[in-house]
Image (cartoon, coloured by chain):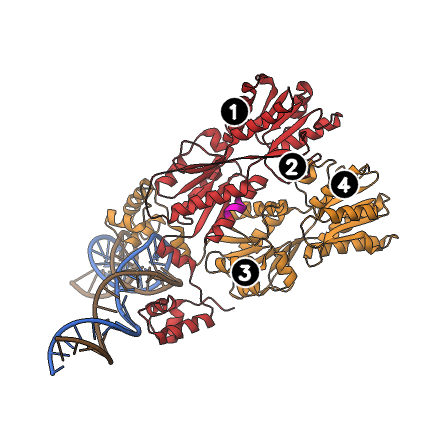
Chain colours: A red, B orange, C blue, D brown
Amino acid sequence: MKAKITLKDIARELEVSISTVSKALKNSEEISRDTKDKVQAFAKLYNYKPNNIAISLKNKRTKNIGVVIPDIVHHFFTTVIRGIEKYANARGYNVIVCLSEESFDKEVINMEMLANGSIDGFIMSLSSETQEKSDYNHLKEVTEQGIPVVLFDRITNEVDCDKVIIDDELGAYQATNKFIDQGKRKIALITTDDYLSVSKARTKGYRKALEESNLGIDESMILKMPSMEMDELAIKTFLNEKEPDAVLCVNEIFAVYSMRLVQEKGLKIPEDIAFIGFTDGVLSKYANPSLTVVAQHGEKMGEVSAKMLIDKVESEAEEETYQTKILEPTLVIRDSIAH
Amino acid sequence: MKAKITLKDIARELEVSISTVSKALKNSEEISRDTKDKVQAFAKLYNYKPNNIAISLKNKRTKNIGVVIPDIVHHFFTTVIRGIEKYANARGYNVIVCLSEESFDKEVINMEMLANGSIDGFIMSLSSETQEKSDYNHLKEVTEQGIPVVLFDRITNEVDCDKVIIDDELGAYQATNKFIDQGKRKIALITTDDYLSVSKARTKGYRKALEESNLGIDESMILKMPSMEMDELAIKTFLNEKEPDAVLCVNEIFAVYSMRLVQEKGLKIPEDIAFIGFTDGVLSKYANPSLTVVAQHGEKMGEVSAKMLIDKVESEAEEETYQTKILEPTLVIRDSIAH
DNA sequence: TATTAACACGAAACCGTTTTCGTTATATTT
DNA sequence: AAATATAACGAAAACGGTTTCGTGTTAATA
């Protein structure tokens, strides 16, 4: 086992000072060609690599970014991470992932852990519990310490920081209009409680489209689930009672499960009943029939978030200006609607 | 913006030395009750938290573990990460995730970046390119430096380190036997090239079951895809030509896609043709019909890997003994086979 | 020849902790 | 009263780098 070599080791071996070694390795003008050659050759031979921790301590920059998300076993978040990771890596940053598991306490603990020097900034999406409680003190504390934060997807207006979202309202609006254009009359919405910022926006878009049409809104055609968890019975009862001819779902699981239910009843998709979901994951692509979805472009979102964060981290200026980037959703047409 | 407070700040304010502050905060016996109270109160008031980086430098322990995996937009890896994250977090560790994207070079670069002090150990699953090249020098270098490594799922025997796998051979063997017991005669296998350790093991289990039966092996019933990527045409041609009455697939996407193909041809699942896949993801659960799979227990795998790694990191002893944990797969019975 | 500039390098501070090893009072023992 | 023990604290080294500011030597200039 050969341990890592340090500047001190090189200095001792070559009988020069540590500062000389450091400068020589940085090709400083101060050091003679001879000495530089000697030091660099030695360093290469013994595969010297500076210790990241020591550099972090000195520079007060870790080149790490903290990502705090509710869940990782979820296609959307997973694509966002990929986007963050790719972009961050290209700029020399590493990504520390922490899961809040939809818990407020875990979110707080994770942030506190990372905020003590481990990272240069946060990229996060709020846990449902946090959105439910509307308690954002942990975020405020962090920003007050001067640590940049970028919020994505599940955001709040109560914290001053950069934000990245997709236009969920527009996505739902377009999807609903698609149904209307295709002559659907009984358009249902399966969503979750409004405290989730995304569900709220999507419901708004759905309402807007219906209001603008001559159909109007039938409140009973909206099923609000208490959480993101599947409640199979609730969906079954709802579909049986309401008999919609089109269903917009705020995620793909609700949609795919619903599709199976109506197929078992002998209904034809999309003739008798059409479906559109949110999140363009594997499920939508390989469902039978394949599911039309409002794509959220998670990877793009991750990239944009990472860029915003790193730009802020590396900008010397202490601007107090924050921006909110709104990405356009796109409708990915598949076999669950007519086309 | 109130910046973080340091020991030095407290010392200056209270007119004591830094050492006294440090000891007081650790409730050292050396320090008088009075001083301790004063220091602790002050620290609490200003919300003092020690700087992780400084502690890491001092202790030569970062409390970070590096996870290097080929892909994150993949249900199995995602569950493994969750398992790692949960366990590691409970023991006070953070998880740095790096994606190799199946590329040898990225795997090497990521490891080198992290190996310079950023992490206490690695948990990783090899990229397909690495397994194809059989070049493990980057792993050997890291272990030689005394950094513990745990390999999971996609492993190699050429590196001395701890390993965690599921018994892929057994899983495939049991699945194939299930088909045989149910009277299936033309049992196909859709897999990938053998350089992927898992595919190799699964193929072995499939062969073993067939050899032990009176069916024997028909090499033409094995479709080897060059990579994990879907080749829709290859699968279509294969199924049309071979007309199997049972298909074992090394992942769920191959299986779900195949199911759709045969359904379009009017075949009944599972009566005419039955399917079993690997990886118990959302796709399997919500497919129509739902897919019977060999569950890989990714989360458990993550937990076990994290435990092995952290135990090694925290053990003072420099044992050179490595173990390989083999987890049992389980067959999750769903509607794609008779039951 | 005295002065100055350029060169090549080292000492030391610093980042924020921890920890060992003094050191100074005061209290206790003989 | 002298010796010793104890309590309470501080100085300084260490972790592994970077960087500022000397400093000594030689070469160029006046």
Local SS, label 2: helix
Q: Check disc 1 and report the residue beneath it.
A: A204
Q: Which residue is mark 4?
A: B261
Measured in 3D between alpha carbons, the distance from the residue under mark 2 to the one under mark 4, in whole angstroms, is: 16 Å
Tell me if residue B63 can be seen. no
Q: Nearer the viewer, residue A320 or B142?
A: A320
Nearer the observer: mark 1 or 3; the answer is 1
Q: Do the residues at discs 3 and 2 belong to one chain?
A: no
Cα–Cα span, label 1 and label 4: 39 Å
Q: Which residue is mark 3?
A: B108
- Quarter of the image for residue B151 reads bottom right
Q: Amino acid at mark 2?
A: Ser
Q: Quadrant of residue B42?
A: top left
Please indicate whether residue C20 sits to the left or right of residue A335 in the image. Answer: left
**Disc 4 vs disc 3: which is toward the camera?**
4
Residue A287 position, x and y percent, is: 69, 36
- Residue B7: in magenta span: no
Which residues are drawn in magenta?
A80-84
- B138 left or right, relative to C25: right
